[in-house]
Structure formats: C-alpha cells, structure tokens
Amino acid sequence: MSPRTTRRTLLIGGLSAAAGALVGRPPALAAPLRPGRGPAATGPLPRVAALPHPPDRTAFEPHEQRFAAYLVTLAAMANDIDDSDTELRGYQVGGWWRTPSEPFNARISEHVATYAWFLTAERTWNPYRGDDALAARLDAAIDYYVRLQHDDGSWPEYAPDEHSRAATAFALGYLSKTLARLRDADLLPERRPEISAALRRAATWFLDPANEGVWTGDVLEFANQPAAGLAGAAKALALDPDPGLQALLEDRVQYFVAHAQSPAGFLYEPRGMDIAYNLNVTLTELHELHVELGRPVMLPTVRRLAEWLRYTVAPEPDGAGLICFASGAARTPMDVLDAVTLDRQQRDLGSVFSRQVPDLAVFYPAAEDRAAQRSAWASDPAPVPPLAPGDTNPRIPANIPYGERYPARRQRDAALRRLPAVRRSRFTELRTDPQGQHYLFVRRPGYYLPAFLGTRPNQVVRAGLGLLWHPEVGTFVHGAQSSNEWCWATVLPNGGTDGAADLAVTYYDGPADDGSVVEPEDVGGVRGDLGLRWTTGGGNVTTSVLLRDDGLDREVATTMDGVEQVPLVLLDDDVVSWSDGTTAGRGTTATAVASGISVHRRGVTLTITWDDAVEATVEPTPRVLFADGSRRCHVLRVPHGLAGRFRYTLG
C-alpha cells in the first residue's frame, strides 16, 4: 500500500469484486453471520399498517416537522424487513438507506433507531407508539443487526469479511439510542441484553488504542467516523457503565483532539480539508459527544475549525448564500451553501454551537428564516410526500432530539460581516499541513481568491486557483472538485490538467521573474503584489501568477499545446462581450476569434485578455449554483500553444 492509498480506498476499489463474488450464491450466504447465530424466531411478521389519513401538518412542533416525511414512509420501510425463515430474517430489504444494498452491509440496519423512536415516542400525530407489528419488525431488525457483528465486536460494510470503522462507529450510536428508548419504554426486554452485549463488544474493539483500523496514526483519517464512534461509545457507557472502557474513551477523546485536526484548522476527510463533512457530520457528532459526556471537551477543536471554515467561503452580495472553495475539498462536493437550506438535512444539529462559537452562525439559516419556512410548511394543504428509497437518512431523525439553535438574523449578519473576505480588503493567509498541502487565501481590494498548492491529499482535489470573488457583485470564476473539465487550469491535448497534479510552488514578493523569494511561513507578510510559480511533477506545465490589487496575471509554459480553461459563473443579466465586439449569451455556446472577453455585471467588469487573437469558446455546463438557479457555470477555453499570457482585471 502506498503512503497515499487509504484502507477505505482499497475497500471501495474492491467493492465490485466483492459484489461479483456473491452472484449466483444463496442470499443467506452473503451475510457473514456469526456461527450458530440463526434468527431467534420464525414465521411471518405482521405488517405495519399504513397511516389511515395524511398527517395534520399543524400538529407537529416546528422543530419536529422533519419527522413527518419519515412518518408517512415508515410502514413501507418497516414492511420491507425480511421475515423469511432464513438467516436473512430481519434484513432491511429495498435499499432504503446505504449502498451497497447487500445483506453484509451493516449500515443498512441503522434505521433500527428510527423504528425505536416511532415505537416509543408519545406524540398526538404518531399512531405507531406501542404498535405490535412495528415492535415485532424492530425486534427482527435488531436481531439481524446484532448477528452481523463479528466476534471481535466490529461490523462489515463493503465486504462480508471487512472490519469497518465506519459501520462500527455508527452502530455504537444507533444501537445505543435504540437501547435507551427501549429501556425507557420497557419494551423488548429479551432483546435489550443482546444489544448491551453487542455495544460492549463494539466499544471494546473501537476504543482499543492498538486498533490501527480505527486510530490511523498521526493523521486520523475520516474524522467524522472516530467522532461518531466516540459519541456512540459515550452513550453506550452512560447506559452500561464500565470504568475500564470509560478510561479508554477519555484517552481516545484526547487522541482525537491531537490527531484529527490539521494545523491548518480543518478536520481530516480523509487526509485533506472537506467543508461538507466537517459541517454536516463531524460537528453533529461532537455535539452528541458533549451531551453524553456532560462537558464540552471538543470546544477548542470546534473554535479552531470555525476559524478555518471562515476562510473557505465568501457571501454573494445579493443574499443567495455562500460560495465555497470547492476545488480544494478532498471528499464531498459542496459548491455553495444557500442562505436558507432545506429543513430536512443533518447539518442543523451543529447550530447548537452558534452561541459558544458565534462565527459558525454564517453556516446556518437565520432563526427568523427557518421559522418562516416552517410556518409555510405547516400551512401547506398538500399531503406530506413520502421519502424515496435511498433518501431516508437515519441521522436526521436521530439528531432531532439533541436540539438546535439557529442564530438570530442580526447574529448571522454580524458573523457574515466578520468573514475575512468581507471584513478586510487586504490580507495574505497561507495555511499549511505537514503533508505538503498549501491552502492560500488572498484578499486584495478588487477580489478574494483561494488556491490549493503543493501535494494533493487525493485524486479528488483540483490544485491551482480555486475561485475569484468580487465584494460588490460576487463570484466570477468558480472551479469544481474532481473534474478536469470544470477546474481553473491549463489543459493539455490528452485532457489532463495541472489542476490534477501536485504543484511544487515558490512564493515571491512581487513578480516571479524579479521578485524576492518568500518562505511559506513568511507569505502572510506580503501585502502588495504576490508572485507564485508552480510546476507539475512531470514538468509539463509551469505557471507563474502575479496577484495584483485589481486582478491577476497568468503566464503559462507547456511542453505541448495548451488551453487556458476558466470556469466562469454567469448571472442572467450579465453581459458577455468578446474583444471583436460580438456577445456571448448565457446558456449557449459561443465562439469568436478574439484576444479577450469581458463579463459586465451591475457596474463591475471582469476582463480577461491574451496576446493574440485566437478562436476561443464559452460553453455552458450543467453546474447551476444556489437553489434559485441564479448562476450557471460556463467554461471559457482559449488555446495558447506552448506558451500563453493572460491578464484578469476587475474594474
């Protein structure tokens, strides 16, 4: 295994082979059930009755409206639990949650916590409280979940013989929540000891400091997973105390603090930064950990994370939301964050930190906006639509009981004004990670520009310049993650780009040709023109960039004919003009023999020029930014042979 090949990469890569090996085998043999552990009961299970009538939207407390979609889907989900007299009894059929939808994937069973909530929650709108059919199907589902557990306490996810950190981490959380609700309601008394024993085995495996499959060394990869395991173990130990395991939990919390967070400020996903996972998953798990431990042990970690995240976004001046430094992310695409997100999503639990960490307020809707959204939902006369298979994330109902705390609009607006791109008109910020990652954030009076340079943490990141944002009219250029066609880069004849390469970079105080070299630790002191020069590992692209107050210059030298590729962001009322006087429309492909192009937006113009008139094109892409569809990404491509010079000016 190479240093940059992760265990999870190998598992994902082997998924097709694992699935293929199951073809033609009886389904029961696909599940790695522990020897001698057959289903505890036989015979058909009663079916859970569908709702007799659509739920009354006004009956839901505002913060519990998210349960409604699960309520109307619950019968269909529960009735898909296998009730055959085979080893598959209790398996959740139908792909309601995770893939691969295979009997060996323990993560499919995580909805036991959803069923337990509806079985035990007393609400006027919940007819499933104490429902015998739901209890019987939940009992079978728990039985199957526990039988999937390996003898060492771990569970599989992507292959029958896998000992998965993720599957075990989340099992600790979902099964402990299930056990807590069953105990409080005094239901399924014969099943509860089995859950307790399974949780003890899982905690023993997960908290073992010698378990390299969980504690991955100086870089604690996929930080959301150990965070989830710590939170789940904390809840399990609150239910069934064990001094030895409690001591291991405290030790592993400190290990997480020391190894899961980059010196740059982000939490590793897997070995680089990722805005979406840090916000959507890890923060929620850290709050659960605080609740279960009864103290905010991760608060300094959260504050450092918030300070980092502030650099990765900039607000669109028309209020659409935040534009994100997507090209530098190493895992989940997150181009934008709408000012008001959909209510049924898992990020909301992290809003509880907005009081103790006010800078996080920008990442959540204002309380007034969420309240208006929920009021509109309650007054909507349409029936609540059911969830489709694959769209039934169990984390959402599991998070709701932990609460929320949306910032008031004035608090959110104040946090927006504190964002570095807004608060200051001039700074240079370079955040580095010991793995050779450079995250550069440059603010000059005319723009904000993030970039990734150095050694990419994986093949998903696109190196080079990430986006170009203007404080008055918003984003003009926005590079995508993962794609060689939608990143801001130099493209070679084979379709490769310098964005998909490690970039050895040197910094200069002034132009790269005659400025003085600046060491990385001193880059933050450059307040005037900042020069960069980077070269791909193979030497086929060398790029010099000068970041001026009103724009930037790019000079490119290649070993074969190259193309300047610019992912432009266009609004409906933008006027796009070629230097020959012709115009290019939004949403259509335009070609011109020109030496420049301009995008005119509400009194501000981005002009891109190059040395010689060549045939250039602007082509629309499927990328539409923000929920209102107000911005569509287009790609400008300008051929330049073996060398090209480009000037970007904002004025």
Image: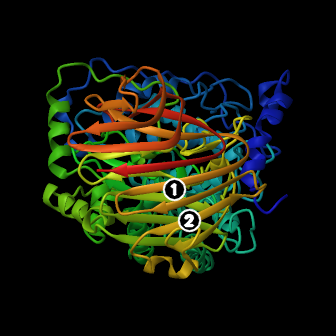
Residue placed most toward the observer, 516 or 325: 516
The image shows residue 530 at horizontal and vertical percentages of 47, 69
Left/right placement of residue 438 relative to residue 402 reads: right
| 608 is higher (above) or lower (below) than 541 | above
The image's colouring method is rainbow
Residue placed most toward the observer, 430 or 222: 430
Count of all numbered marks drawn on residues in the image = 2
Tell me where residue 37 sits by quadrant. top right
Left/right placement of residue 120 relative to residue 252 reads: left
Residue placed most toward the observer, 180 or 376: 376
Label 2 Cα neighbours within 10 Å, binned few <14 / some 14-19 / many ≥20: many
Q: Earlier in the sequence, mark 1 or mark 2?
A: 1
Residue located beneath label 2 in the image: 532
| 336 is higher (above) or lower (below) than 254 | above
Q: Which mark is residue 176?
A: 1
- Considering the numbered disc 2 on the image, is that residue within a helix, a strand or a loop? strand
Point 44% across, 80% down: residue: 525
Left/right placement of residue 93 relative to residue 600 reads: right
The image shows residue 256 at horizontal and vertical percentages of 57, 73
Quick check: can you spot residue 510? yes
Where is the N terminus found, in terms of image quarters?
bottom right
Q: CA distance from mark 1 to mark 2?
A: 52 Å
| 299 is higher (above) or lower (below) than 152 | below
Looking at the rendered image, the disc whose residue lies closer to the viewer, 1 or 2, is: 2
Q: Amino acid at mark 2?
A: Leu
- Considering the numbered disc 1 on the image, is that residue within a helix, a strand or a loop? helix
Quick check: can you spot residue 399? no
Point 28% across, 47% down: residue: 316
The image shows residue 307 at horizontal and vertical percentages of 38, 70
Residue placed most toward the observer, 159 or 429: 429
